[in-house]
Image (tube, helix red, strand yellow):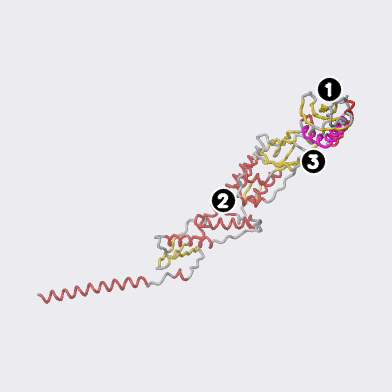
């Protein structure tokens, strides 16, 4: 009995070792199985697109498999060759690097989305790498892509209709946005000729939408409320110039109009958007009469319009440069007509002030003012108010007399309201007799008036 049990123990022990050895041998055999044939040699298929991707094993669980799947999807997308058809948008814009780069980037970034329906053929994980094998039925893919293209063309046509409706209402920004959205709806299919019927005729959609956008901007009409801009004393040398923009005879709202004119010191520039009536008001002021052939100019600011319309940058590139017509309005500065006289409050006899009067008349004529006679209608009256201060001589200098001349030049408008008072620099005359001293002080005052007062009055009256 003991011997039988001993034999049984030996047999059991042998079976145990055999199973252990068999298990080890099986595991070793699995590790040494060769990788699938598709890893070493890419499969060829006339009915399917192929996508194979691999990634190095990572300590992060699932990271290598996820990367391999992304690469397989990208590889599958690269198999679907983008053939540029004749007369397509991409062919017509082949020299535009921005468009080509944008299209290639779009295809790459939406690879997995646009190859929906692919199947996983195999996944193989080795000790160092993970490999993924995808394939996509060519006929099924073509059918799905054509369905997307038809939907995109329908969307582009709908955007065209909404854009045209916005144009009829003068809403240029909204119209451009709809037309631009129509172009972008077809982005995936810019390599194909996308034709549909619009208004009873077959058109290629993207070029038609782009031409419509260009022609609409070129069709904007600008008009000013006046044909010549006159600045004069009657309007205080300021003029609110109205500008009106229309499209197809309808007020064009939300249009950025840029305008400029030279005020004698620098070119003043501004950009404003038209209101609901298509109007912009530009306040013109400070224009120098000395600048010849001064002109106000205004035109449409296309760059601001693209931004305000929220157009995709690639659509702006496709539209290209648009040069609109410029509205030009000449500016005339009509200098005021003035009377010049001695103030009744002056303490210096009028008969002594001929030199001062002549100096002021010359100064005003130099500044472009029209100096009129006493019986002619003038825009402004200018009066000279001089006060003399005669100092008696001291014992030490009893042979000399000193006269100080103080004064004010005062301007009044046609209503008699004082508009400006300019204080003259104090002058002094020293001579052996008081009459000569006063004449010397008056001569110095006249010299001051001719050099400085004319410019000050001109600046005050414009």
Which region is colored magenta?
Answer: 437-462
Per the picture, the main secondary structure of the magenta-coloured stretch is: helix
Give the CA separation, mark 1 to mark 3: 41 Å
Residue plotted at (80% across, 32% down): 426
Q: CA distance from mark 2 to mark 1?
A: 92 Å
Along the line of sight, the residue nearer the viewer: 239 or 430: 430
Quadrant in the rendering for residue 363:
top right
Which class describes the residues within 10 Å of circle 2: few (<14), some (14-19), or many (20+)?
A: some
Mark 3 packing: few (<14 Cα in 10 Å), some, or many (20+)? some
Residue closest to the far left: 1
Q: Front-most of 407 and 418?
A: 407
Residue where numbered disc 1 is placed: 344
Q: CA distance from mark 2 to mark 3?
A: 57 Å
Indicate left or right for 57 with 4 as reference: right
Label 3 sits on residue: 294
Give neighbour class at mark 1: few <14, some 14-19, many 20+ (Cα, 10 Å). Answer: few
Q: Secondary structure at mark 2?
A: helix
For the residue pair 431 and 30, the one nearer the viewer reads as 431
Asked which secondary structure carries label 3, the reply is loop
**Residue 290 counted in the magenta span:** no
Callouts 1 and 3 close, C-beta under 8 Å: no
For residue 448: magenta?
Answer: yes
Q: Secondary structure at mark 1?
A: loop
Q: Is residue 240 above or below residue 201?
A: above
The residue wearing badge 2 is 150
């Amino acid at each position: 009995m003991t011997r039988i049990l001993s034999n049984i123990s030996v047999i059991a022990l042998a079976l145990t070792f055999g199973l252990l050895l068999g298990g080890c041998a099986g595991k070793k055999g699995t590790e040494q199985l060769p990788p699938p044939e598709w890893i070493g040699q890419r499969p060829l298929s006339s009915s399917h697109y192929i996508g194979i991707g691999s990634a190095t094993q990572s300590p992060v669980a699932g990271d290598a498999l996820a990367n391999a799947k992304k690469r397989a999807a990208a590889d599958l997308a690269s198999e679907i060759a983008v053939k540029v058809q004749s007369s397509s948008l991409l062919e017509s814009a082949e020299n535009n690097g921005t468009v080509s780069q944008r299209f290639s980037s779009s295809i790459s970034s939406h690879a997995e989305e646009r190859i929906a329906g692919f199947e996983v053929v195999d996944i193989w994980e080795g000790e160092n790498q993970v490999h993924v094998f995808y394939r996509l039925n060519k006929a099924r893919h073509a059918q799905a892509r054509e369905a997307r293209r038809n939907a995109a063309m329908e969307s582009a046509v709908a955007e065209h209709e909404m854009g045209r409706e916005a144009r009829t209402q003068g809403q240029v920004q909204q119209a451009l946005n709809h037309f631009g959205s129509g172009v972008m709806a077809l982005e995936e299919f810019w390599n194909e000729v996308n034709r549909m019927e619009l208004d009873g005729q077959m058109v290629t959609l993207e070029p038609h939408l782009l031409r419509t956008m260009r022609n609409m901007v070129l069709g904007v009409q600008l008009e000013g409320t006046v044909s010549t801009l006159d600045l004069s004393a009657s309007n205080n040398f300021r003029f609110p110039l109205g500008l009106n923009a229309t499209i197809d005879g309808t007020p064009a709202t939300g249009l950025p109009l840029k305008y400029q004119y030279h005020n004698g010191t620098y070119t003043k520039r501004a950009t404003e958007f038209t209101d609901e009536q298509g109007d912009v008001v530009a306040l013109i002021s400070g224009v120098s009469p000395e600048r010849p052939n001064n002109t106000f100019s205004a035109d449409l600011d296309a760059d601001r319009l693209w931004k305000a319309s929220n157009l995709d940058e690639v659509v702006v590139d496709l539209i290209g440069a648009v040069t609109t017509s410029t509205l030009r309005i000449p500016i005339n500065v009509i200098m005021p007509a003035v009377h010049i006289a001695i103030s009744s409050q002056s303490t210096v006899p009028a008969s002594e002030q001929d030199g001062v009067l002549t100096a002021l008349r010359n100064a005003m004529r130099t500044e472009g003012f029209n100096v009129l006679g006493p019986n002619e209608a003038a825009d402004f009256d200018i009066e000279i108010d001089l006060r003399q201060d005669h100092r008696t001589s001291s014992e030490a200098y009893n042979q000399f007399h000193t006269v100080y001349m103080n004064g004010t030049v005062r301007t009044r408008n046609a209503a008699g309201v004082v508009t400006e008072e300019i204080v003259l620099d104090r002058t002094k005359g020293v001579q052996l007799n008081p009459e000569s001293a006063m004449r010397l002080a008056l001569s110095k005052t006249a010299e001051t008036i001719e050099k400085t007062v004319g410019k000050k009055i001109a600046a005050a009256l414009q």
